[in-house]
Image: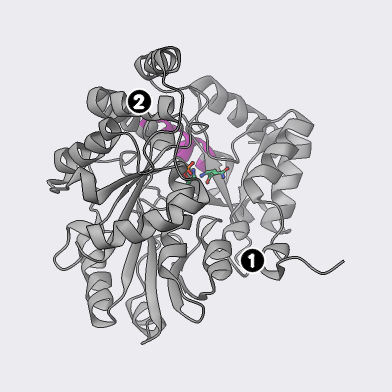
Amino acid sequence: MKPANSILAGFGTTVFEVMTRLAIEHQTINLGQGFPDEDGPDSIKRMLNTATLEGPNQYPPMLGIPELRQAIAAHNKRFHDLDVDWQTETMVTTGATEGLAASILALIEPGDEAVVFEPLYDSYVPMLRRAGAEVKFVRLQPPHWGLPREELAAAFSERTKLILINTPMNPTGKVFDREELSFIAALIEKYDTYAICDEVYEHLIFDGVKHIPLITLPGMRERTIRIGSAGKTFSMTSWKVGFLTAAPNLLSLIAKAHQFLVFTTASNLQRAVAHGLDHEQDWYTNLAVELQAKRDMLHDALTDIGFDVMPTAATYFMNADFRSLGFEGTDVDFCRHVTVEAGVTVLPVSALYATPDVDHLVRFCFCKKDAVLQGALTRLRDFFGA
Ligand code: PMP
Ligand code: GLN
């Protein structure tokens, strides 16, 4: 048979699926794939029920139901003082993942270059390459993941079509500050490019640090696509409802990709999420407070066990170097080892690099019940004799 598409054929199964399958197989405590073990607010579950029972359960408008698009616009105004016309500048996507894919497909022409930061969320590179982009990688370095300004400037060229920025960032827990974003914005203007901003963790941020959307910086309004996720904001990762905000000319282009990818997103989920955005601000702002306490607890406990733990300012995730425990294999070896031998699953960070040579870090997901985190820590303490 003729070979299928060689770009996609070259990628394995996503690491999140691989590690969760391994966790199930060995019946471990799974701190690998990023998902909370407690669902979001009951009010949105009830609204989902009502919306399903009341109907209609037929195709909603392609760009999303007005209720949710108005809620997305209001959310932009409430948190970032960003004035958005819901009719021309918002779109509902089937998860942030689809919003990212539609944006990439709408902008990239074969031969364009795209700048990304490593380590990165695993859907970016396959989608960029499949769209025909040559990907330019800029590595952030642990433990502080600062912006390497010279390297970033060198990654831009006349062929750069877009930069993809994830802030707050998975897996590093980094939050880009205003100075870093201004530096990036200057490059975007200089090279006349676009920015796709993956901001799915915008509310999961600690220590009073503020999330700054690039779209709010001078000159960025016409060039930036801002993407959020109900999965993250409401701890409902299965729901796959994304929020996209962009200037009208950009939005209408992305809508052309969206209409052929999925056309639209389940209407009952949209109504439930609209209810959440309008009425559950307290819920998701409290979630950040709870997560911050879990972060602090896990950080101290892993340090006591002997891990070299990195600071994290946001997201569900914390990274740690395991070499301080005397383990000499790779991160993939380490993850298999603790899964099989200690009954705890974590994620190898090398899977989030295009070239997996940074192989001494593992990612812990801490959006879990305290008892679950304590259970994992007890197992790790026993195993490492701490
Ligand atoms: N971007 C990042 C950085 C993520 O960690 C995730 C994981 N959920 C997504 C996008 C995907 O979001 P969704 O589930 O809404 O597609
Ligand atoms: N965003 C989640 C993580 O980083 C998982 C997403 C997925 O499973 N596709 O773990």
Residue 113 included in the magenta stretch of the image:
no
Percent x, y for residue 160? 39, 80
| Label 1 neighbour load within 10 Å: few <14, some 14-19, many 20+ | few
Quarter of the C terminus within the rendering: top right
Height in image: 87 above or below 251? above
Q: Tell me if 67 is positioned left or right of 124 in this view.
A: left
The reply to whether the residue tagged 2 has its Cβ within 8 angstroms of ligand 1 is: no
User: Which sits in the foreground, 307 or 85?
Assistant: 85
Q: Could you tell me if residue 246 is visible in this image?
A: yes
Q: Residue 356 carries which label?
A: 1
Query: Going 41% across and 29% down the picture, which residue do you hit?
Result: 267
Residue type at the position of mark 2: Arg
Query: Going 35% across and 25% down the picture, which residue do you hit?
Result: 271
Q: How many labels does the image show?
A: 2
Q: Residue furthest right?
A: 1
Percent x, y for residue 383? 71, 35
Quarter of the N terminus within the rendering: bottom right
| Label 2 neighbour load within 10 Å: few <14, some 14-19, many 20+ | many
Which quadrant holds residue 43?
Answer: top left
Which quadrant holds residue 12?
Answer: bottom right
User: Which sits in the foreground, 253 or 312?
Assistant: 253
Percent x, y for residue 92? 36, 42
Residue that label 2 marks: 271
Height in image: 14 above or below 231? below
Local secondary structure at mark 1: loop
Residue type at the position of mark 1: Pro
Q: Tell me if 210 is positioned left or right of 30 in this view.
A: left
Which quadrant holds residue 205?
Answer: top left
Region rendered in magenta: 293-303
Closer to the eye: label 1 or 2: 2
User: Which sits in the foreground, 101 or 188?
Assistant: 101
